Amino acid sequence: MATTADFRNGLIIKFKNDLYTVIEFQHVKPGKGGAFVRTMLKNLRSGKVLDNTFRSGETLDIVRVERRKYQYLYRDGEHLVCMDNGTYEQINVPSAHIGDGINYLKENEEVEILFNGEEIISVDIPIFINLKVVSVEPGAKGDTVSNVTKPATLETGATVNVPLFVNEGELLKIDTRTGSYVERVKA
């Protein structure tokens, strides 16, 4: 059993019969009364964030999870087929574990899967992925006064708003957390 003194960012705890990761925490010692720890916890299954206050020294269950690197091979219905790079063993991962980032995941990309024993808790994809522009409308000349964007379709089928100077066939760096354009990548 661990206590609130063991809190650190990224720690995974069992709280209210579910698994949460500590996003941030703050030890508070008011002038009057006992000390406490203010935390922001993220549910690993649903992704919801909740604020919670623990009494200082309160005991908690810390969950040991294992992170393994896998290579995303292809999509099979509602599952993703991933391969362990060391043993070449293939597993099916429900696409619900990835969320919106699945729109930017291309084949042969490396992902990190969190396991609690043999149960898959979540899948972490790279924060930035380089994707090729498949189709984009040409930008209007002289329309550079403000920050104007246009929709572009990427090789994975996702649509992203990009600046007017981006053309078909270019490689773009995309933020998978927000689904937004970051910059052009030089080949």
Image (cartoon, grey):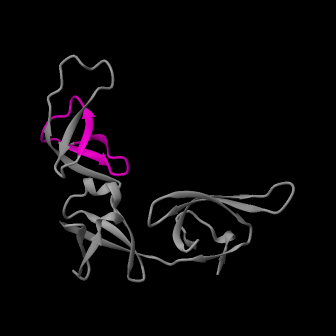
Q: Residue 54, position in %: x, y?
A: 69, 65
Q: Residue 94, position in %: x, y?
A: 30, 69
Can you see residue 176? yes
* Residue 164, magenta (yes or no): yes
Indicate left or right for 51 with 86 as reference: right
Residue drawn 27% across the image and 20% down it: 144
Q: Quadrant of residue 161?
A: top left
Residue span colored magenta: 159-185
Q: Residue 153, position in %: x, y?
A: 18, 43
Number of disc labels: 0
Q: Residue 85, position in %: x, y?
A: 25, 76
Can you see residue 187? no
Residue drawn 22% across the image and 36% down it: 151
Indicate left or right for 36 with 83 as reference: right
* Residue 161, magenta (yes or no): yes
Q: Quarter holding the N terminus?
A: bottom right
